[in-house]
Amino acid sequence: MFRFIHLLIDDFVNLLFPTLCLGCKQSLIANERVLCSACRINLPETNQHQEPYDQNLLNKFAGKVPVRFLASYLHFTKGGVVQNLIHSFKYRGQKEAAKELASWYGSQLKIESKQLQEIDVILGVPLHLSRYKQRGYNQADWIAQGLAEALNMPMVIDVLNRNAFNESQTHKNRLERWENVNKVFSIVKPDLVKNKNVLIVDDVLTTGATIEACAIELVRAGCKSISVITLAVADR
Ligand SMILES: [Zn+2]
C-alpha cells in the first residue's frame, strides 16, 4: 500500500515536473529537477545581483525610469541550455519548471543581495488576455511566484493590463518600439502598488522596452521604486 501511494506521488510529481532534462533531454535521476546535474552546474549564471548597478544593464533603460535594482539570473545564448529552458517555459507548458528555476535564483538572492529586502510587492509582466487564454498561464507570473516564495515576499496579480499585442516589431527602431510598447500597458489596480517598492519580473530581458513600459505605468500609479529581475538576459 505504501509503495502504491509512493508510486502515485511519483506520477504526480512527474506530471508537474519533466522527466527529461530541459537542457539536454537526458533522463533525470533521483533528486534532479528540471535540469540534470551537468546542465545545472554549467548554467551560465551572470552573478549580476552582486553588482546590480551594472551600467550596461541600466543603459537599457536609458534613464527613462528610475530603476533601483536590476539583475538577470542567466546569460541567454541562441541554441544553448537557457534558450531551451525559456522555450519550454513559454511554449511547452513547463510553468512549474519556470517556478523551480526562479526559486533557485531566489535562494541565492536571499543570501547574497541585501537590497531586495526592501521590496514590498512582486509582479510578473502581464500577457495580453488572448495570449494568456491561448497559453493557459503567464510564465512571468510563475517566475514571480518562485521568487516570491523563496524571498518570502508578497506577489500581486492583475495590477496592469496588457492592451494589445506588440510583436513583429523587428523593423522598427528603438524609439518607435519603445513608444509602441509604452501604449500597451494600463494600470488596473493602482492601490496595490502606490507607495510601494515594486519588483517587476519577466523571463527574458532583451531591449528592456517591455519592462520599461510596465515601469512607466507603475511610476504613474505612484509606486515608490522599481526593481527588475529576469531569468535570462540577451547580451548584446
Ligand atoms: Zn542536462
Image (cartoon, rainbow, N blue to C red):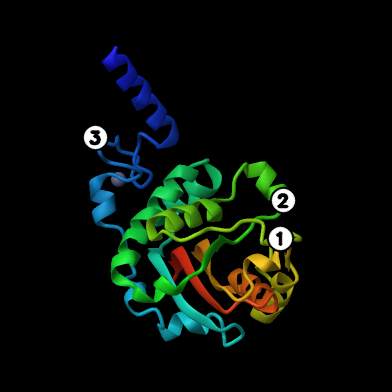
Q: Which residue is mark 2?
A: 129
Name the residue type under label 2: Leu
| Residue at 53% from the left image edge and 58% from the top image edge | 155
**Disc 2 secondary structure class:** helix
| Mark 3 residue crowding within 10 angstroms, few (<14) / some (14–19) / many (20+) | few
Pointer 3 residue Cβ closer than 8 Å to ligand 1: no
Q: Quadrant of ligand 1?
A: top left
| Mark 1 residue crowding within 10 angstroms, few (<14) / some (14–19) / many (20+) | many
Name the residue type under label 3: Ala
Determine the image quadrant of residue 164.
Answer: bottom right
Camera-side residue of 126 and 120: 120
Q: Which residue is mark 3?
A: 30
Pointer 2 residue Cβ closer than 8 Å to ligand 1: no
Residue 124 visible in the picture: yes
Q: In this rendering, would 61 be left or right of 118?
A: right
**Disc 1 secondary structure class:** strand
Camera-side residue of 3 and 90: 3
Q: Position of residue 138 (x, y in %)?
A: 59, 50
User: Do the residues bearing badges 1 and 2 touch, measured as CB atoms within 8 Å?
Assistant: yes
Camera-side residue of 208 and 109: 109
Name the residue type under label 1: Arg
